[in-house]
Amino acid sequence: MGSHAVQPETRDAPAVPSVSTIAVTASLGTQSVDARISALAAVVPGEGRLEGLGFSPEVINRLSSSRASSTRKQYKSKWTAFVAWAEKCQPPRDASVPSVSLLADFLEHLFSVKEISPNSIANYKSAVLYYWKQSVGFEVPGDDSVLRDLLSSFKREKPPAPRTVVPWNLKLVLEVFRSEKFLDYSTISDKELTLKTVFLIALASEIAVVSSMRSQELT
């Protein structure tokens, strides 16, 4: 029997595009940069691919609403930014053709040029990968560490600011609320009265919880 040479699959091998993606990209050559950006940014993730797989319009519509509208808007905004960046590269690069190296260059651009925080860059990565997966079925191989290591390097270079808890003194707060200013409600503003009311309710609730826990411990 004759043997056939097996060609190794590369990380950046493009997935088979959907019919709708082919139609969009085929018409881009004669368009201006702004027109090409608008056309690619308007691609509905998953629509053409799901149609090609035989799913009904009802199911496609249901699947399109599986994510919150706010998430879809954020993803579309980030996908549009990615498309615009790719079109303005020299030479222009095709955002509709999945490539780990292309996405890595975009993330580096966001970090080095746009100075976006690592956590926000991770959201851009998720948005682009979502469009690629839904539109052409592309997924980054599970053992590919390039994007993960790239994000880690961003976080090492620009670590997030530690969250600090503002210190406060319960005794001092109570003394203020017992002062002459707060004895006459006609002399304080609605805001100050609201602050005092909310604080006392929260304090009473906390005391009730602590008292209940101690009672349970004694029983």
Image (spheres, rainbow, N blue to C red):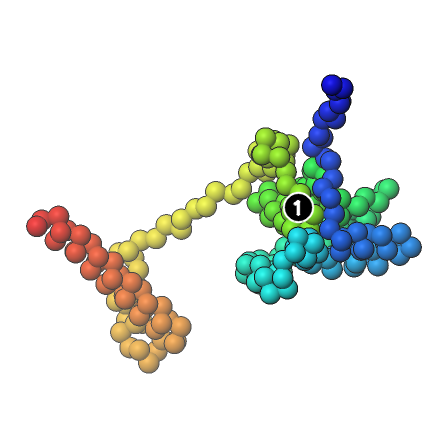
The answer to whether any part of residue 61 appears in the image is: no
**x 34%, y 73%: residue:** 193
**x 66%, y 53%: residue:** 53
- Residue type beneath disc 1: Gly
Toward the viewer: 84 or 98? 98
Q: Position of residue 81 (x, y in %)?
A: 72, 52
Toward the viewer: 66 or 145? 66
Q: Position of residue 77 (x, y in %)?
A: 67, 57
In terms of secondary structure, where does tag 1 sit? loop
Q: Position of residue 41 (x, y in %)?
A: 74, 57
Residue 154 appears left or right of 87: left
**x 29%, y 77%: residue:** 184
Please identify the residue farthest to the left as the structure is shown: 219
Q: Is residue 195 above or below residue 169?
A: below
Please identify the residue farthest to the front as the structure is shown: 1
Residue assigned mark 1: 137
